[in-house]
Amino acid sequence: MDQRKILDLLILRPKGSYDPNWREFIGTQLVQVVEEFEALLGPELVSDIETAMAYDAVGAMRRNGTAPDNLILAYSNPQYMRTLNVGWIGARRKNQTFIDFANTKGTELYELFTKNGANTLGEYNAPTYYGMDMWALGANAKYGPKNATLTNHAVEIMTKVWEDVSDHYNPYLGNMAGPYDRAYTRDMTTHDAILSMFWWGIFGYEKAPAPPKSDLDLNYDASQGAALALIMETVASVFSPEVTDKLLNPFTTERFLNKTIYYDLETNDSRIATSWLSKFLMIGGQKLAETVARGQQFTPAIVHWAADPSHKPYPYNGFFSLYPSATTITAVAESHLLTISYPNTTQSGTNSFQFMLSGIPPPWNLAGNVVDGFSNLPCLKVNVTAPGLQVLPTVYGSMIYDHYYYNITYVVPTGFEGVPKIVFEMEYTC
């Protein structure tokens, strides 16, 4: 089970609250326990687990994404886990209601993933939760009922997700290019993401984009290592030689990606994610028009670069990302260029562009250098064009998910007319 969920519930959440996704995390773990170790558990305990899973299924089926519940079809990781849980206990107990529900959800999830040939998860490019997607899909492929729709589609979905992951992955920087729908960490080499566990399990720790083993942040996800290890062979079986090469070997050419992410099966409402990668510098942006904030995990625009090329095993990753204060954002990545604008200024949060800058190597600071906006950065020349906007003094010391960062804010002044816009032209200089 994802230990971040435990910490979130026990420490960060107010008393009396709970996370309904716990059902899916615990349920999928019970599925694996029974499938792998049923002979060691004994029939009485297995029967008790099945009874608990039947209650799990009933509760899971009652969630339909209607507020305040958030389990819409595009919420990928709990959707895939829920479908496994309900289908598995349906097959064990021969409950046709459970079986039918799981098959319907499995079909809908596959249709959303493949809609208009997009082959994208609704919870897109999320380093932490892609790990849980792989957990759910790998478990579906290995433990799911053989005739269940999601079991039948799991290998195809995993294959295409890993193709997309490998396209976004920069082995030199040890990170995936943004934008990220959800990210606890913006740098997998310093703060762990569950997805990195699959590099570790398949290729070995030395090849994994992961923090040092002594880092306490690793404890959250490494605690799930034993469970993940039992599905590693299943997940690894979908890797083509090309995917493996992209996951392990640094590239020297530029790469551009343009992906569409759909919300549902009923409309063509979508978001557009663009990513540009080079060996030393990569950029990601997302275009969306929404009314509800996605929260501080959402990273609609981000730039990574090798801020200290001598750092081992990966160059020290400098990065800056847009804090998502607005809900309608047009962020587009191009070669050496990031353009961000707020097309709908009637919404709150469009009065400023707030950037979090982190990953500045200590030797650069110790040499007497000081971050002053984007004008003085190690190994990166940035030309900022922000017509009519006012830049505030740089402030350091805040933290988001263990990343200390510099706050660089451009204010949209009162009386501003037109569409607020900021453009970054970048050149790697080391």
Image: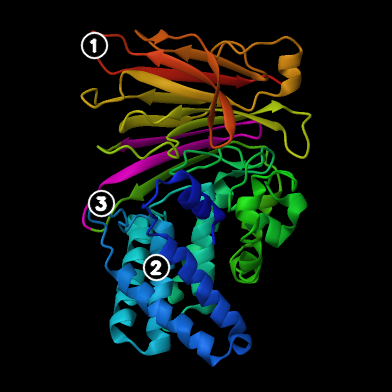
Precedes in sequence: disc 3 or disc 1: 3
- Which residue is at 30% across, 46% downward? 270
Quadrant of the rendering where the N terminus is positioned: bottom right
Q: Magenta span has 73?
A: no
Q: What secondary structure predominates along the stretch shown in magenta? A: strand
For disc 1, the marked residue is: 417
User: On the image, numbered disc 3 is attached to which residue?
Assistant: 68
Look at discs 3 and 1 and give the one toward the viewer: 3
Asked if residue 278 lies in the magenta stretch, the reply is: yes
How far from the left and from the top, in percent, is residue 11? 50, 46
Front disc: 2 or 1: 2
Q: CA distance from mark 3 to mark 1?
A: 36 Å
- Tell me which amino acid carries mark 2: Arg
Q: Which residue is mark 2?
A: 82
The answer to whether residue 64 shows anywhere in this view is: yes
Q: Residue at 33% of width from left, 76% of height from top?
A: 103
Q: Nearer the viewer, mark 3 or mark 2?
A: 3
> Which of these two is toward me, 394 or 196?
394
- Which residue extends farthest front? 15
From this view, report whether residue 123 is shown above or below residue 339: below
Magenta span covers which residues? 266-288
